[in-house]
């Protein structure tokens, strides 16, 4: 079985993207007001404070932020993969797929959706794959259990899935153990496993982390080909702005368990509005090459839900004033398709702030 476990380079490969500036619609996949708390003994902590995002059909949406921002918790919550003995969703949390509410579904109902309609790729293939079973056996196990397939039919489906993710030596890989494969090949196996049942939505949690730049480019190129050919949607969870720049149509920026900015990926990267987004871009080497001074974000991200009153980014923000420290900014529409939660956002054309 494939086990569920919740610093990377950037590729230089330019991928074709849709150029629509419209925000994703709510009809396909929608997360609304998601809040997730974790219980450890008598201690209660928040992993996600308030997250709302949408993914339209046949679009590529990015969710970006530093480690600890709540991205992976959001991805796991989307498929009901959080441990119910320690994790609790807020009362207003809603996760819907094609009009069906997933929050409150039974485990049996969720299992019908997992894999066949929504699939997930975990970020660490060495930990996600069971080291004592051959790759093919792990991939076929879910198929045989869920669809009562014969061993030979399941093997053929696995071979087809491996070939779809550009593993041309699929006859060798299917009988290999995970430790016999390279990191990039293991990542392809995980993606192939997620595609076995041809889902309509793929959630990819850091699918290129810990891979070198060349392998990362290959993985992104392969993902681009697969989602385009199958007209799939993808929610790409990452901390790498370079990956988002090349792959995503629309982007959500997450900080301390909240979405702080959203909009078309190209617009956000070319003209960020939130000081946190500006900071993320400032500490990322230029995608166009050339030399420029890199900046660093002072301080560190607070644990979600443990920030002081006001804007969670205020202690690290050079623009913060009394308003920022005492009043949490609400998400507002800045322009068509662009939303942000900030009292003093950037005006891209002038470099001044909105007062």
Image: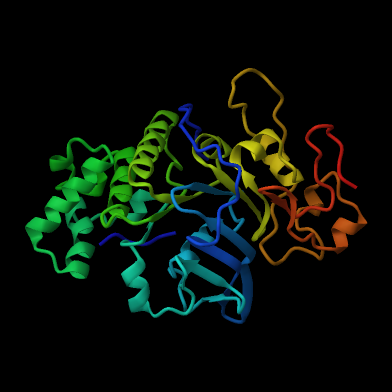
- Is 338 left or right of 76, judged from the image as shown? right
- Is 300 left or right of 179, judged from the image as shown? right
Which residue appears at 67% of the width and 36% of the height? Answer: 281
Which residue appears at 56% of the width and 75% of the height? Answer: 89
Number of numbered discs visible in the structure rendering: 0
Which of these two is toward me, 80 or 16? 16
Residue 353 versus residue 85 in the image, above or below = above
Q: Position of residue 75 (x, y in %)?
A: 49, 60
- Is 229 left or right of 30, judged from the image as shown? left
Q: Position of residue 222 (x, y in %)?
A: 35, 37
Which of these two is toward me, 303 or 91? 91
**Residue 227 in which image quadrant:** top left
Render colour scheme: rainbow
Which residue appears at 58% of the width and 27% of the height? Answer: 287
**Residue 224 in which image quadrant:** top left
| Residue 180 appears in the rendering | no
Q: Position of residue 50 (x, y in %)?
A: 65, 65
Which residue appears at 32% of the width and 54% of the height? Answer: 194
In the picture, which quadrant includes the N terminus?
bottom left
Q: Position of residue 305 (x, y in %)?
A: 69, 67
Which of these two is toward me, 281 or 301? 281
| Residue 332 appears in the rendering | yes
């Amino acid at each position: 079985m494939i086990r569920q476990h919740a610093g990377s380079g950037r590729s230089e490969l330019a991928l074709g993207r849709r150029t629509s500036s419209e925000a994703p619609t709510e009809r396909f996949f929608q997360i609304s007001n998601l809040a997730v708390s974790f219980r450890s003994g008598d201690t209660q902590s928040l992993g996600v404070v308030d997250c709302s995002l949408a993914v339209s059909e046949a679009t590529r949406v990015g969710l970006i932020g530093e480690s600890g921002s709540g991205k992976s918790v959001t991805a796991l919550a989307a498929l009901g993969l959080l441990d119910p003995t320690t994790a609790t969703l807020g009362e207003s949390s809603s996760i819907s797929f094609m009009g069906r509410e997933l929050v409150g579904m039974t485990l049996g109902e969720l299992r019908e959706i997992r894999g066949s309609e929504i699939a997930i790729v975990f970020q660490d293939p060495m930990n996600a794959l069971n080291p004592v079973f051959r790759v093919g056996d792990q991939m076929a196990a879910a198929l045989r259990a869920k669809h009562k397939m014969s061993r030979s039919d399941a093997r053929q489906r696995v071979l087809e899935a491996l070939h779809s993710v550009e593993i041309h030596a699929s006859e060798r890989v299917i009988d290999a153990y995970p430790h016999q494969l390279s990191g990039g090949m293991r990542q392809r196996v995980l993606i192939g496993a997620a595609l076995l049942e041809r889902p309509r939505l793929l959630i990819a949690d850091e699918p290129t982390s810990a891979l070198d730049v060349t392998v990362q480019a290959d993985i992104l190129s392969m993902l681009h080909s697969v989602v385009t050919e199958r007209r799939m949607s993808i929610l790409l969870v990452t901390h790498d702005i370079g990956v988002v720049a090349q792959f995503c149509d629309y982007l959500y920026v997450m900080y301390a368990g909240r979405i702080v900015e959203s909009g078309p990926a190209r617009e956000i990267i070319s003209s960020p509005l939130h000081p946190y987004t500006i900071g993320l871009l400032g500490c990322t080497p230029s995608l166009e090459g050339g030399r420029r001074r890199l900046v660093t974000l002072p301080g560190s991200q607070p644990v979600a839900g443990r920030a002081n009153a006001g804007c969670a980014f205020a202690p690290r923000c050079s623009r913060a004033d009394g308003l920022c420290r005492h009043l949490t900014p609400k998400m507002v529409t800045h322009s068509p398709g662009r939303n942000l939660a900030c009292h003093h956002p950037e005006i891209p054309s002038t470099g001044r702030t909105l007062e």
